[in-house]
Amino acid sequence: GAGVSQSPRYKVTKRGQDVALRCDPISGHVSLYWYRQALGQGPEFLTYFNYEAQQDKSGLPNDRFSAERPEGSISTLTIQRTEQRDSAMYRCASSLIWTGGELAKNIQYFGAGTRLSVL
Amino acid sequence: GQNIDQPTEMTATEGAIVQINCTYQTSGFNGLFWYQQHAGEAPTFLSYNVLDGLEEKGRFSSFLSRSKGYSYLLLKELQMKDSASYLCAAMDSNYQLIWGAGTKLIIKP
């Protein structure tokens, strides 16, 4: 696609429910990143993929959070047994490559995000 | 640890020049990025520096000093539409971006 697409844009759920957030990166981009962003703060790293391989999940807050990118394109971030503290803006970004070479290829392009509200 | 510092908020006048500073400490360094984020929108890429010196792109310029762990974003001929948050991010040795909290820039007529 022309840009990074995230769905849904808004998600309201009840505490204890599972949610799945979807990210469709820019076509051809190798790397895909998940961030969480609180109001007035910079993005907080959660996890990232190169192709279908999850390279780093050190930013995932706990084992209720998981992510996958089975075919190296679309990715899903799943939060199980949601809690009120999970309420936040979840952002996805993609880049052409992930390492070295021309820095321009490391530029991350962000989607509009999913605003998650846990009641 | 890894850390990015930038001012929380700055105010400037339409038509003027403003400089937003950023200092960083990272494990290794592979470039310094600046993003613009309007309220309620996604961050959008503005510029990057990997070598020392000034990079100019129209009204926006970005400077890097690797020895000092310092960068700034210079905005000239400020317009009301430049009111936004400006995020500084340093790429570490693992090619991961370490993000600052952002500087909210308020432009007054």
Image (spheres, coloured by chain):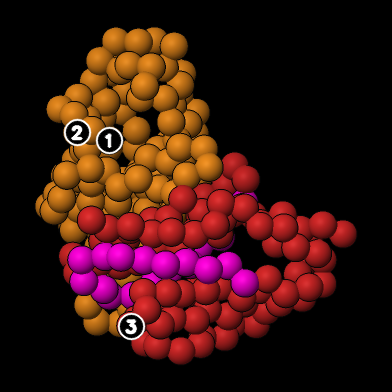
Q: Does residue A54 sit above or below A66 in this rendering?
A: below
Which SS class for mark 1?
strand
Which residue is label 3 attached to? B67
Which residue is label 2 attached to? A66
Which of the chains bears the disc numbered 3? B
Chain letter, red: B
Q: Residue type at mark 2? A: Ser
Separation of residues labelled 3 and 2 (CA atoms): 39 Å
Q: Residue type at mark 1? A: Leu
Quadrant of the frame with the N terminus of chain B: bottom left
Q: Nearer the viewer, residue A99 or A73?
A: A99
For the residues bearing labels 1 and 2, Cβ distance under 8 angstroms? yes
Which residue is label 1 attached to? A77
Classed neighbour count for the residue bearing mark 1: other residues with Cα under 10 Å, few (<14), some (14–19), many (≥20): many
Q: In front: mark 3 or mark 1?
A: 3
Whether residue A105 is visible to the viewer of this picture, yes or no, is no
| Magenta part of the chain | B19-38
Whether residue B69 is visible to the viewer of this picture, yes or no, is yes
Q: In front: mark 3 or mark 2?
A: 3
